[in-house]
């Protein structure tokens, strides 16, 4: 399954500044694993050692909130990574 | 509260809107709004709320105007540099609209004063640049039953969401917790000057809608804005039954400053704080140099601009997982831009059992000023 992953501003240092990167996988877990292979360290910024989504991160597939990494991803989906921002 | 002849003239374009009209304008005149942070977001929000005729506008900030603020904080001009933000802002807002009251709250919000400050207002706009204040204000608004319009910015991206008591999720439902330092601030990562204009105007729009009872507020809808793609996105947010403050069994029943677990004062007392001169002295001798491991906890793009010789880059967000990479028997010395993230790194190291970590006080900014003027620290 080919999808697009939207990278939030605070994590774009991992993707060379890219706001959108292609993703592969049938679940969010697989998509994140693919990202980790290309952008080492990025998965840990979203998910902790127990594979729980970090509390300052939200993941969506299109407009559906992801509560478990087994959430399915279909071809053409957009996976949004939303990160708390602190600036004012 | 009726409108004076000059107000009828001043607000003519509002009065011409049937949705708002005279009744809406009178509601705005009766309204009391407090803006937390007279910064990038607070500037446009306060200007538009003053122009719109919000009768009482409170401003909370403890800082003075700096030259680097003027790239985005349109409340201030060059002559304001060095003045208290609250006082300079009051002068500017009253010059724009002398028919309103502007209250300057020159203070740092904390658990002791937040309820007193917010209690006398009808609506709260949060434009702070500190995560701990963001949670403090959210919790106080939930506990006091005050509407809260939140926004936040970073580089080219912004978020906005509104909380209405009993009607939708709060900021803690959106992000249950976040550690300061793990989420980069604008002073470290930079921000496009015009970005907060968009989000601050969204906040003012929400405030006016809520106060006058028109339209649909962004309750349960997170609005994200990407300036580079010029794209707004709306994502649903639901109330969390287990939310620590607005959930069914809340554990937060009073505002607290204790949100920042990593900055535990007792733990941080064990941190060795090195001045730039002290670190320079340690690095000058091979004998002492070999007892240290320099860990630069900035983001890779900051590290790549310039870093100290021999320093390794482990971004703060990865540190917890990669602590095992630190050489045993050596003192880790954490480095960052200003000394804030390096202190957080010390807190993480202490929590994971490392003894006596050190950090460069004042960060690489201090290093550039005191030791090596050719050291390039950026972006800031």
Image (cartoon, helix red, strand yellow):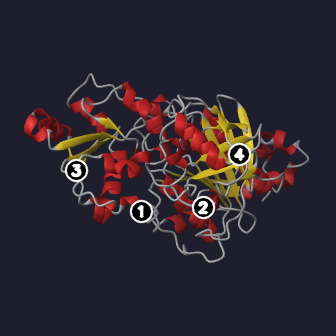
Give the alpha-carbon distance from disc 2 to disc 3, as whole Å.
Answer: 39 Å
Q: Secondary structure at mark 2?
A: helix
Which residue matches tag 3?
Answer: B328
Q: Is residue B189 in view?
A: yes
Going by the image, does B28 lie left or right of B133? right
Tell me, yes or no, whether dots 2 and 1 are on the same chain.
yes
Task: Please give the chain letter of the residue carrying mark 4.
Answer: A
Mark 2 lies on residue: B172
Which dot marks residue B261?
1
The residue beneath circle 4 is: A26
Q: Nearer the viewer, residue B235 or B56?
A: B235
> Sequence-wise, which precedes: disc 1 or disc 3?
1
Disc 1 versus disc 3: nearer the observer? 3
Judged from this view, the residue extending furthest toward the top is B374
- For the residues beneath circles 2 and 4, the answer to whether they share a chain is no
Mark 4 crowdedness (10 Å alpha carbons): few <14, some 14-19, many ≥20 = some
**Residue B114 in the figure: left or right of residue B280:** right
Rendered location of residue A29, percent (x, y) = 62, 49
């Amino acid at each position: 399954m080919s999808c697009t992953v939207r990278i939030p501003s605070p994590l774009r240092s991992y993707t060379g500044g890219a706001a959108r990167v292609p993703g592969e996988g049938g679940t969010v877990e697989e998509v994140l694993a693919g990202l980790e292979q290309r952008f080492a360290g990025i998965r840990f910024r979203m998910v902790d050692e127990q594979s729980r989504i970090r509390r300052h991160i939200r993941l969506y597939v299109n407009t559906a909130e992801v509560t478990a990494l087994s959430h399915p991803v279909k071809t053409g989906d957009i996976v949004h990574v939303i990160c708390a921002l602190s600036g004012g | 509260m009726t409108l004076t002849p000059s107000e009828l003239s001043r607000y003519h374009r509002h009065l011409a809107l049937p949705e708002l009209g005279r009744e809406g304008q009178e509601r705005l005149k009766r309204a009391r709004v407090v803006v937390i942070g007279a910064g990038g977001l607070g500037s446009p929000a306060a200007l538009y709320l003053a122009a719109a005729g919000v009768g009482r506008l409170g401003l909370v900030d403890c800082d003075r105007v700096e030259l680097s603020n003027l790239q985005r904080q349109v409340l201030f001009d060059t002559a304001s540099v060095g003045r208290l933000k609250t006082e300079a802002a009051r002068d500017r807002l009253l010059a724009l609209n002398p028919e309103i009251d502007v209250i300057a709250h020159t203070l740092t919000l904390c658990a002791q004063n937040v309820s007193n400050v917010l209690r006398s207002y009808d609506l709260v706009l949060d434009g702070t640049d500190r995560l701990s204040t963001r949670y403090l204000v959210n919790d106080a608004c939930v506990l006091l039953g005050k509407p809260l319009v939140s926004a936040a910015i970073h580089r080219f991206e912004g978020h906005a969401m509104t909380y209405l008591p009993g009607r939708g999720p709060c900021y803690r439902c959106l992000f249950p917790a976040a550690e300061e330092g793990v989420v980069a601030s604008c002073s470290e990562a930079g921000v496009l000057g015009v970005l907060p204009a968009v989000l601050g105007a969204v906040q003012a729009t929400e405030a006016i809608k809520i106060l006058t009872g028109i339209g649909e507020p962004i309750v349960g809808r997170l609005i994200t804005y990407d300036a580079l793609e010029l794209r707004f996105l709306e994502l649903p947010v639901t109330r969390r039954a287990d939310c620590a403050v607005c959930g069914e069994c809340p554990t937060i029943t009073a505002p607290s400053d204790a949100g920042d677990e990593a900055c535990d004062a007792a733990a941080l007392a064990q941190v060795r704080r090195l001045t730039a001169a002290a670190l320079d002295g340690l690095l000058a001798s091979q004998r002492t140099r070999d007892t240290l491991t320099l860990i630069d906890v900035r983001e890779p793009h900051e590290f790549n601009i310039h870093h100290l010789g021999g320093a390794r880059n482990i971004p703060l967000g990865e540190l917890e997982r990669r602590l095992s990479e630190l050489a045993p028997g050596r003192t880790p010395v954490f480095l960052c831009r200003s000394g804030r993230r390096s202190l957080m790194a010390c807190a993480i190291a202490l929590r994971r059992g490392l003894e006596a970590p050190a950090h460069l006080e004042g960060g690489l900014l201090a290093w550039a000023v005191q030791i090596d003027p050719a050291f390039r620290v950026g972006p800031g």
